[in-house]
Amino acid sequence: MNLKSKHKVEAAFSMSSMTDIIFLLLIFFMLTASFITPSGLPVNLPSSKNSSIVLQKVSVTITKNLDYYVNDKKISFNRLEMELRNSFAGKEGLVVLHCDQDVPVNELVKVASIATSLEAKVSIATKPN
C-alpha cells in the first residue's frame, strides 16, 4: 500500500514580497521627508505661528554675543557686505537671517539693509510655535 502523498508541500517562506514592501516604505519616507538645511550654529530663534521652509542661499547668523557668521564662517561686521557680495557672485541673492532672540533689533536691521542694498531678498528664520 502506497501512503505517500503525490503533492509535496514545501515549508520555505519567500521573502521577496517582504523586501518589496520594505523598499516601498523606504522610498515613501525619503520622498515625504522635509529637506531642511539647518544652521550649524546654536542660536535661540524666536518663534512664530506661521513658519515656512525657505531654500537657503546665504545664511547669516548673529549670536547672542553679536558674533556674525556667513555660511558658518565667522567674520567681522565690517567685512559683512564684502562677504555677502562674494557669496552672491552674480546669482540671485537670498539671505536667511538666523538671529538669537536676545539680539537687538537694530543689529538685525543693519544686516537686512546691507542685504537689501545688494538687491537680495531677506528672510528671517524662526522656529515653529
Image (cartoon, rainbow, N blue to C red):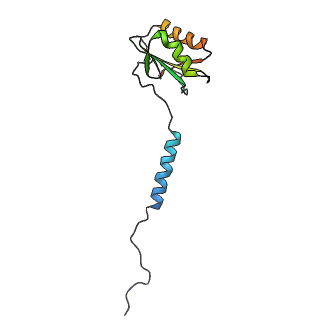
Taking the image as shown, residue 118 lies to the left or right of residue 22, namely right
What residue sits 57% from the left and 14% below the top?
Answer: 115
Displayed quadrant of residue 50: top right
From the viewer's side, name the closer residue of 24 and 122. Answer: 122
Residue at the extreme bottom: 1
What residue sits 60% from the left and 17% below the top?
Answer: 120
Taking the image as shown, residue 8 lies to the left or right of residue 81, namely left
What residue sits 45% from the left and 57% below the top?
Answer: 18
From the viewer's side, name the closer residue of 25 and 72. Answer: 72
From the viewer's side, name the closer residue of 34 and 128. Answer: 34
Taking the image as shown, residue 64 lies to the left or right of residue 53, namely left
Residue 53 on image: x %, y %: 54, 27
Residue 61 on image: x %, y %: 46, 18
Residue at the extreme top: 106
From the viewer's side, name the closer residue of 85 and 41. Answer: 85
What residue sits 52% from the left and 11% below the top?
Answer: 111
